[in-house]
Each structure stands twice: as C-alpha cells, then as structure tokens.
Image (cartoon, rainbow, N blue to C red):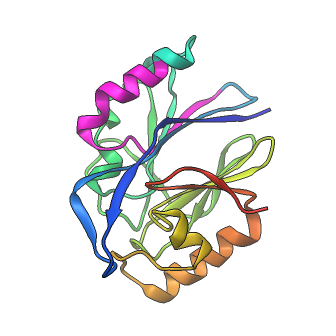
C-alpha cells in the first residue's frame, strides 16, 4: 500500500485582517512511498529547512534523499521549492501554468498518474499552475499546496489571501473536497474530512 509521511510541517502566520506574514513561512514537505517502488517528495519547503528535511529522512530510516526519484512542486513559490537541489536523482514535476526556472523540469500539461495510485491534478487559483497530488493509500489523501494553506482555508472555504483567480480557487477547493478523505495543507497539519 502507498504510504505518506510529513517530512517537515509547514508554518504560516495569518493575521486577523486575513493577510499573512511572508517573512517567516515555510511549506509542508511530504514523502510518498509507492507500491511500485517510487519515492516521491511533494514540495521541498524553504531553503532554510534543508537541515530539518535531512533529519526527517534519518528519523524515517532506510531511505535517503538520493533515493527520491520524483519531486512534485505544487507551485513555484520560494517557500515550496527551496530544497529541490537536495534530491539530485529526482525528476521534478511542475505544471505548465507555473513560471519556474527549475532546470530539466518535467512539464505537466494535464492531470496525470505518475505512479500507481499517485495522480497530479491541476487545482489553480493560488497560482495559475497550482497542482495537488491525489494519493490512494489507507485513505484518499490530497496534498494541496497553497490551494488550502491552512485548515481553515479548506473547512471554511476561504480562498488563499494570495491568489491569481478567486473563482478557480473556489472550484479547486470543491474538486478536492469531492475526492479526498484527508487533506495535507500547504502550511498546516494534515486533517481528516471524512
């Protein structure tokens, strides 16, 4: 069965007026191990989170950054792409709607399965090329990046403070809600929705 671990839990401070503190923020970084032998990291967090990511691999054990064969970037903001270089053997997946300068990135043009039970799904709104990763494991997990940076964004259907298209963001939240049992937000703890 596919498995998911959180390597680094993200952090984002949202103020009462809805604005966010962009100076002290980093994204959640998740690890997927698949039945068919793939090791996938979703989002690599901010560059200053390199040491905690390495420590997480040590805690998990029997797996190393060099074992990662795929990195998926939910979008290309700096708090999600800061440690791509740590995964030297990985193909990096980025949606075509993103403006990214990742060398040799594999450009995703449509929803696609990259491993057994692991599907990349276009969920725009926060950015034009935002993607979520839908994973079939013991439950159906959606690793959603900043489509829902915090739990409240999903449970209360609050679109992200930073967005390119409010209607697309709302539609993406609904698409995720129809499919997922567990949400892994971009900057918050995973939580069950059913």
Which residue is most to the front? 16
Q: Which of 162 and 188 is in front in this view?
A: 188
Residue at screen point 29% across, 75% down: 19
Q: Nearer the viewer, residue 155 or 169?
A: 155
Residue at screen point 43% across, 67% down: 129
Q: Does the magenta stretch include residue 54?
A: yes
- Is residue 125 visible in the rendered structure shown here? yes
Residue at screen point 73% across, 28% down: 36
x%, y% of residue 116?
74, 40
In the picture provided, is 12 more to the left or to the right than 152?
Answer: left
Which corner quadrant holds the N terminus? top right
Which residue is most to the left? 23
Which corner quadrant holds the C terminus? bottom right
x%, y% of residue 3?
70, 34
In the picture provided, is 146 more to the left or to the right than 175?
Answer: left
Q: Is residue 48 magenta?
A: yes
Residue at screen point 42% across, 74% down: 160
In the picture provided, is 53 more to the left or to the right than 51?
Answer: right
Position of 126 relative to 117 (above/below):
below
x%, y% of residue 95?
45, 60
Magenta part of the chain: 38-57
- Is residue 87 visible in the rendered structure shown here? no
């Amino acid at each position: 069965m596919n498995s998911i671990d959180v390597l680094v839990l993200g952090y984002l401070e949202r103020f009462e007026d809805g604005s966010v503190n962009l100076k002290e923020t980093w994204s959640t970084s998740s690890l997927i191990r698949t039945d068919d032998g793939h090791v996938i990291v979703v989002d690599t967090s901010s560059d200053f989170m390199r040491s905690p990511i390495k420590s997480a691999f040590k805690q998990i054990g029997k797996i190393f950054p060099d074992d990662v064969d795929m990195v998926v970037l939910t979008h290309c903001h700096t708090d999600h792409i800061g440690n791509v270089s740590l995964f030297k053997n990985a193909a990096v997946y980025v949606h075509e709607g993103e403006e990214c300068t990742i060398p040799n990135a594999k450009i995703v043009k449509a929803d696609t399965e990259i491993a057994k039970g692991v599907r990349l799904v276009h969920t725009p709104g926060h950015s034009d090329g935002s993607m979520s990763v839908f994973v079939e494991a013991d439950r159906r997990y959606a690793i959603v990046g900043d489509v829902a940076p915090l739990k409240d964004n999903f449970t209360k259907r609050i679109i992200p403070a930073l967005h390119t298209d409010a209607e697309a963001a709302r539609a993406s939240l609904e698409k995720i809600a129809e499919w997922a049992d567990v949400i892994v937000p971009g900057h918050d703890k995973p939580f069950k929705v059913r």
